[in-house]
Each structure stands twice: as C-alpha cells, then as structure tokens.
Image: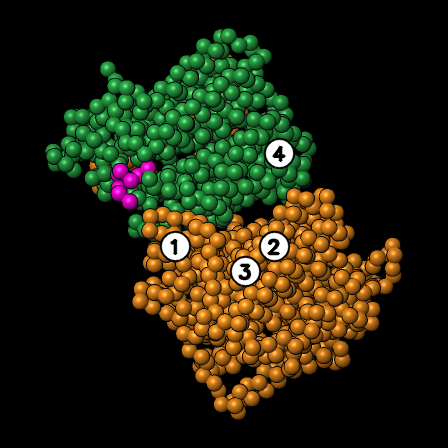
Amino acid sequence: MPTTQELIAISPEIILALWALSVMFLDLLIAQSRKSILAYWSLLGLLLAGGAEFSLWGREEILFQGAFVQDNLSLFLDLVLLLATGLSLLMAKGYIKDLEMEHGEYYTLTLFATLGGMLMAGAGDLLIVFLGLEVLSLSLYVLSGFRRTEPMAQEASLKYFLLGAFASGFLLYGIALVFGSTGTTLLGGIAVAITEGGLLGDPLLLLGLGLLGVGLSFKVALVPFHMWTPDVYEGAPTPVAGYMSVVAKAAGFAAALRIFLSAFLQLAGDWTLLLSLLALLTMSGGNIIALAQSNMKRLLAYSSIAHAGYILLGVIALNSWGLSSVLFYLAAYGFMNLGAFAVIVALRDGEREYLALNDYAGLGSRHPLLALSMAIFMLSLAGVPPTAGFLAKFYIFGAAVQAGYGWLAILAVLNSVLAAFYYLRVIVIMYMREPAGQVAKMTHSPALALAIFLAVIGTVQLGLFPAAVVELAQASLFPFLGS
Amino acid sequence: MDFVRLVPGFPLLGVVLVALTGRFLGRRGTALVACGAVGLAFAVALGVTGALLQTPPESREVEVSLFTWAAVSDFQVDVSLLLDPLSAVMILVVSGVGFLIHVYSVGYMAQDPGFRRYFAYLNLFVFSMVILVLAGNFLLLYVGWELVGLCSYLLISFWYERKEAAKAGMKAFVTTRIGDFGFALGIFLIFATFHTLDYAEVFGSASQVLTTGLATAITLLLFLGAVGKSAQIPLYVWLPDAMEGPTPVSALIHAATMVTAGVYMVTRTHVLFELAPISMLVVAVIGAATAFYAATIATAQDDIKRVLAYSTISQLGYMFLAVGVGAYAAGIFHLTTHAFFKALMFLGAGSVMHALAGEQDIQKMGGLRWTMPLTSITFLAGWLAISGIPPFSGFFSKDEILASAFASGQILLWLVGVITAGITAFYMSRQVFLVFFGEPRYSQHTAIHAEHRSVPHESPWIMTIPLAILAVLAALGGFLGPVLEDFLGPVFAASEARQSLPPLNEAALIILSVAAAGLGIFIAWLGYIRRGVDPKLVAARLGLVYRLVRNKYYVDEVYHALLIRPVWQAASVLATAVDQAGIDGVVNALGSIMQSAGRGLRRVQTGFVRSYALIFLVGVLLVLAISTLR
C-alpha cells in the first residue's frame, strides 16, 4: 500500500490522470455544440496539477521503493510540460472545432500524453521510463491521426506508429540488456551495480545503453532517427504538431537526463563521442534541409530537429551549467516554438489552413500584431538577442565551451548562422513581399490570442530577465552535481 | 552620471511611442517624437560628458549596472553601461549626427507612405547603436552588434517593392553574418579563457592570462566581425549595394555610425590587440589595402551614392590603419570627422537626388551650383574635408593617421595611405565637378518635376539646416583634434604614445600628403573642368585596367560563382534527395493510390516506412558500433 506521503508526493500525476478520466466521463454528458467546455475543464486540471507541483518544490521524495522520484528536476520538467500542454490546448480549442474533430478524446489523449511525459521526467526505474514513453507515444499516435478523414493524417499516424513501435522495441531490448548485465532496472541500483560489479567496460551494458539511447533518440528526433518528423508534423493537426515538438522532446530529454544522471554517470566518458556525432548530424541535417522548405510546418519540423541537436550539447557538457542550460533551453524552446505553431494555427480561414511560406506574404501590413509575434518567435528561434532563444543558445554553447567542447560549440555557432537564413526568410516574406493570388486570412479567437500573447511574453521575458528561471533550473540539478 | 541610461532610454521610448501611437500622432507628431527622442538623447550625452569632464582624468570611468541579466553558478553578466571618454565620444557622435539626420529625414521622407515605419526603425537604430557603444561587457556589445545589423537590413530593404532593395538587404545580411560568426566565436573564446565577459575583468587580467597565440586567435576572430560590419576586404561587398536604402539611412548607418562599429570595437578591445602583434599587423594591412582598393573602384563609378559608398569603405580602411598601428585616438578622431563630412556629403547627395527626381547618375547632372547654392557650398566643405585640404577637418585626422603610420615604422603602409589620399582627392573632385560644375546635362535625360517645376530647386530648410550645421563641423571639426586626443588619453594610457617625429619630418609629411591631394584635384580639374584631357580617351587607353576598376574587380561575380551558387546547389540537392523523395513522393502518389485502392496503398506506404526504418537501422548500427567497439 502506498503511504499518504507517497500519494501527496505524486499528487500532480494523480490529478492529471483523474482529470483525463473525468474529461472522458464529461464528454458523455456534454452536447456536441458545447464541447469547448472540456477545453476549459482540462486547463483547470493543468492549473491544479501545476499548483501541486509548486507546493512540492524543494522536496526530494523517493517513492515506491525508488521507482519514482519527485524532486526539483522532475518538477521543473513537469512545469515545462504542463505549460506547453496548456498553450497547445488554447491553440486547439477553436482549431478542432473548425476542422470538425471536436471530440472529448482530444483532451483526454492530450492529458494522458502529458502524464506520460511526467512519468518519464520522474522515473526512477527503467520500466517506468518505458511505461511513461508508451503512455506518451500511444496517445500521440492517435492524436497525430486525429483528422481521420484526411489521408495525410492517416499516413502520419500510421508512419509514426510503425516507426515508434520499432523504436520502442530497441528501447525495451536495451532495458533487457541492462537488466541482464546489472540485475536491476532501478536507476540507483544500476549505478551501484556498475561500481560494485566492476561493469565499467561490460559490452552487454554498453550495448544496452546504446539501444536505450536509440529509443530516446527517436523520441526527440535526432538524426538519423528523425525521418518521421516532417511527415508526421505535416499530417498531424497543427496544435498537435506544436504539442509534439515540445512535449515529446522535453519528455525525451527528461528521461535521458534521468537515466544518465542517476544510473550511468560513471560511463560519461563513453558516450560523449557518440553524442557529439549525433549532435553534429542533428544540427547540420536539420538546418540544411530546413533551408529548402516551402511549407511552414515542415520548416518548423526540421527546425525542431536542429534544436534537439543544440540541446544535446548541454547534455554532452555534463556539468551543472550544461544541464541547467538544457532545462532553460527546453523552457525557452517551449515558448518560442509553440508560439510559432500558434501563429500557423491563427492563419487559417475556418478549416482551410495556409501552410505555404508564400501565404505569409504581406502579413506584416494586414495583421501587424500577428506578424510581429511571428517575427519575435522567428528571431528567437534564430537566436537573435535579446530574445529567449539567444540566451538559451548562449548558455548551451557557453557550457560546451566551458566543458572543453569548443569545437562542437564552433560548429553549433556555424549552424545557427546557417539557420538564421530560413528563420529570417519568414520575416522577409511577411514584411517585404506582397501576396500573390489568394490572400491568407486570419481566424480570430480569444483563446488563441491568449496563447500567442503568453508565448510572446515568455519569449521576451526569458530573454530579458532570465534570472528567475535560470535559478530554478540550477536548483533542479543541485542534488546531482552540487552547485 | 546615472543619467547615462537615458541616452538609450529616450530613443527606445521613441520607438515604442512611434510604433504604438504613431497612428494617432500623424506625420508631424511622429516626426516630433522621433527627432525629440534623439535630440534629448544628445542633450543627455552632452550632460554626462560634461559631468565626466568635471572628474579628474584618471577616474573618468563609470559603470552603471541596470540589472543582472544572466547568471549561472559563478558566472554573471549584467546589463551594464560603461561611460568613459571613448564611449562618451561615440554617443555624442551617434546621437548628434543621428539627430541632424533625423531632422533632415523629416523633409526627405515627407512624401513617403512608410513615414512612421521609417522613424520607428531609425529610432530603434539609434537605441541599438548607443547600446553597442555603451555596453560594459562583451555580451551586451554583441546584443547591440546584432541589433544594429537588424536595423541595417530593415532599412536597406526599406523600399522592399524594389527588387534590388530586397536583394541588397539579403546580401548585407549574408555577408555580415560571416563576420558575426567570427565575432561570436571570438567572444566564446574570451569566455572560455577568462570565464567572464566583463570588460574590466577581461582587460585587467589579459596580460597575465593570455599567451600570444591565444591573444592572436581571439583578436583575429573579433577582427573578422569588424571586417564584416565595417565593410573591409574581403567582406566589403554588401556596403555599395546597401545604397538601395533611403539616402539619410546611408548617411547615418552606412557612413557615419554603424559601419564604424568595427573600428570602435577594435579600439575598445585594444588591450587584447596589443598582446597580439600579428593581429595588429593584420588590422593595419587590411585597413591600408582596403583604403587603396576601394578608392580605386570609386574613381570609375557613375552613381553618386556608390562613389560615396566606396569612399566610405576606403575611409574606414584609414581608421583601421590607424588602430592597427596603435594610434587609437587618431582612429577615433578620423571616425568623428568622417562622420561629419561623410554624413554631410550623403545628405548633400540626397538633396541633389531630391531635386533631380531621384537621378543618381553623375554623368547626367552638372551645373547645380547655380540652382542649389546651399547644397553646393556645403558639399564643397565636405569635399575639401575628405580630400585633406587644410584647414578642413579631414586634413587633420588623416594627417594624424599617416604620421602615426610613419612613426610606427610602417613606411609601406604610410606610402599606400599617401597614394590613397591622392586618389581620394581625385575621385571626390571628379564627383564634385561633374555634379556641381560645368554645363547642366540633366535636361536632356531626366524629366525633372515635370508637373511643377522645370528646373532643379533648392531643398526645403528642414533639409538644408542640417547640411549647414554639418558643413560647419566638417570644416572646423579638425580643431577638435587636440581636445579629443587629450580627452581620450586616459583610455589608452597603458599603450605607448606614438613617438613624436622631429618637426621637420612632420612638416615634410604634411607637405607630401597635401601635395598628393592637390595633385588628385588638379588631375580631376584637367579632365572634368578644363577638359584638357578626355577622360574617355584615358579610360580607353587604360583598357583592361579601367574595365577591371569599373566593374569593381568582378569580385561580386567571383563570390557568386565560387561561394553562393555551390551552397545553394548543395542545399537544394540535399533537400530533393532526402526530403522531397519522401514526402512529395507520397503526396503525389496519394492521387493514384486512391484509384488503385488498398493494394497500391499498402505497397507505397510500407515502401516508404521501410526506407525510413532502413535509415533508422543504419543509425542503430552506427550507435552500437561506436558505443561498443571504440
């Protein structure tokens, strides 16, 4: 039986799970015309869960014989996940109604997916990592195919599912090998086994670790495990694509941090070469291919791949600065990327979406505020000061330099120079090109406006006054690395 | 001296007011707010400089920290402003010249539909530039550096309906990015070495921490940034194209202020440069080479603004020559006088274009001194200043640079400088003679203001008054020299003062450089006033050399063929190979899939997923190979 203390410590997860179920139940009672109540109801759940997170701040609870950990690291990541979920729900409310897919399941699945991410962030056991990953992934498979009548959506969903299952297989196999080598799946237990059993060079363990890495790499879309990303983002409903781009990535990095910090810290030297190579491939691959995109969602898909590469730099640096910069980057990325997706959501005429880059021509004069927001997000994604994206990059690259990976930082800076082209191109098109042919319309909705507004605030706030969030991020890592 | 925060504060307020409430302010209100903001900034700059002068020379350094910006463990960066004589001079130039150009713009842009947007950008630029020069650490410097770049692109492509303007903005962006890349790396390297980005801490410990090799690496990277921003060889190509922007913008951003940011930055970090003799030499050589090279191009251009643009590149070369030989105060002195006379000439050129319905070809002008007396007289002041004729300002500052180069033993660089001075006098005289003297040639070519006037007319007072003020500064600014060098002295106290030359040598140098200038003017007079020599004939005689210069040494074409095309081809090949075969294939296939139903669907779909999975598998093998074999 779990103790009361354990139940309190895991209350955010419990709240979210109950809330997801309650949405399913309420869905039965609410008429189709009033489904948007569910959006507000879900947002309330997110707020409550977030409040619970805040009240737990500063505690370090190891629950269920070590299977789950509720510490500042998981709380910080949970807050990022909840925030991203909230923004994506605000975006989705009008969107799914206009595109005639306003079913209660949308909200339920979103909440469950977030719950999966939170489980990954707090996992103390490899099986919990797997459990969280599957909860997250299964929800996302369905969500990405939510426009059932669209061939593109079906294709996205099916592709994501097939490749996701493939990746899960590797992950599970990795877990099995690690278990075979160390005799446990508890993260803390693995660390002990490695030291006591002298397993530092054990091939079975290394193989297992490699396969674990493959599974997570798929989730955060590192090159060459990224192939699904553009297709799925393009086929999925836009708010879902935005949601995936942030939540799935944050959850993947959360699990990676957990696993590497708690279980394999002693093997750190073994994976840096591999991770450096992956980071390099990911940054360069994402940015170069993004250069030639003419569809906004695909552009952001490749952009999000590249960002995963930058984030990896912080993991490679593996010092308190690097890891806190990973957390900061995830927060900044959440705001700017979801903001960009929110603008895409806004730029539609009922159910017709305007996804081509050229549809953005003349947006600057027709919808100045929307264009300004998009410009801020693009500048931030490009890493232009004084936005959140700039500081986030500065922290990450600075950490890499400090940890002695100067060459990687150089390549990363070179990459961000390259990346500026395609982000700036969006701005150029918005402000300096007249629309040819049909003019893209904008759909107004208070919820969506709120989402964009919050994302702008977050992007600017984290750029100008990042101190508070940086302190939180550092506090999150204290137990692992000291100050 | 806390008031220094108001120097960036007012322009920022201006941006916000113009952007948010400009709609209600109207044109008059917008102009008033925008000019007022910069005017107030200038007033504050004067005030804080005065306050700085009240303190003893050795303690003229105030750091005002606004708030802590970024902090990780023991590392902290504040948003802090550093006021010392160097930044004081810079904010005076930026806000002072900036104010005059704002006022001028009110007249120049009066008819433009983008009036409000223009002033919002211009105020934003002044804000960014002030941040750049007042920054108290490298990170804030970088912020200012990027922001002025952004303003520059926005203003170059201000008239984006014109295809050239949009292209020029992109070109400026691409080219300066290369420099910024080096600049960012330099900052990272500083950070990796010092674990701080604060000026005081870095400069304070530089001599103990840095080895010569490291200092060379850092300074060369920083200098790469300066080369991009200040349009030196080989990254100068963007500046001539930047002339697509409105002329006051060319005056403010692409002549007087932003392009001098590189000179300012090298001066600011001179402590580091002095630890790296090789870097100093590189700076001086690039500077001298650029000065000469750009001047030769300017001799064969016919666009009134492009001549001035190449002249700007050339004059910036002089400034780098100065800082490269350790004559920092001379560099900043020339930066200041150049801001006066080049802003003056650009605004004068704008006034001419204003009168000639936008004509920019100097071959189609002539005789304007009668119809535009004020513009002509003021332009002449600029001409004499840049040509280095005493007692106009350019004479003093250029002479100071050449004397410093000579004194430092760089006789070859000095010689290049003197020859360039002659070429400079020639091409500027050519321009002046073609535009303001001789017979009018515009009537045959341009329909000038057909609707109201048949002859060119003088510009309105709101444009001529700034011209007059700048003309006075360009004429007399040279006498500021000793004051300026005295004021800047403490900043460069640690560096060796230049060995003073024997008076006789000094006089000989002056005579030589004035003679070079005189010769240049004389040749231009022969060719374009006296018509004793036919320039066309000379051009024909020179043949290949002339064609080379006229076509700017074909550098644009070479860059295009060697750099730009290959990159784009690579990107599009990658995109087609990796990307479009995937998704576009699927999309195109979908149509036929619908027809051939289930069987086809399954085959196509699994086909693609299989290829994805294959790549996935390759990745897995890679991961396993690296993680186990090593």
What secondary structure is found at the residue carrying circle 1? helix
The residue that label 2 is drawn on is B10
Instruction: Please identify the quarter of the rendering in which residue A160 is found.
Output: top left
The amino acid pointed to by label 1 is Phe
Foreground: B596 or A222? A222
Q: Which residues are magenta?
A: A476-483
Ranked by sequence position, the earlier of labels 3 and 2 is 3
What secondary structure is found at the residue carrying circle 2? helix
The amino acid pointed to by label 2 is Phe
* Mark 3 chain: B
Foreground: B34 or B206? B34
- Which residue is found at the position 37% from the left and 39% from the top? A472
Q: Which mark is residue B4?
A: 3
Between label 3 and label 1, give the one nearer the viewer: 3
Q: Residue furthest left?
A: A197
> Gap in Å between the C-alphas at discs 2 and 1?
32 Å
Between label 2 and label 1, give the one nearer the viewer: 2
Q: Residues within 10 Å of mark 2 (few under 14, many from 20)?
A: many
Judge whether residue A80 is colored magenta: no
Between label 3 and label 4, give the one nearer the viewer: 3
The residue that label 1 is drawn on is B188
Chain with green colouring: A
Ranked by sequence position, the earlier of labels 3 and 1 is 3
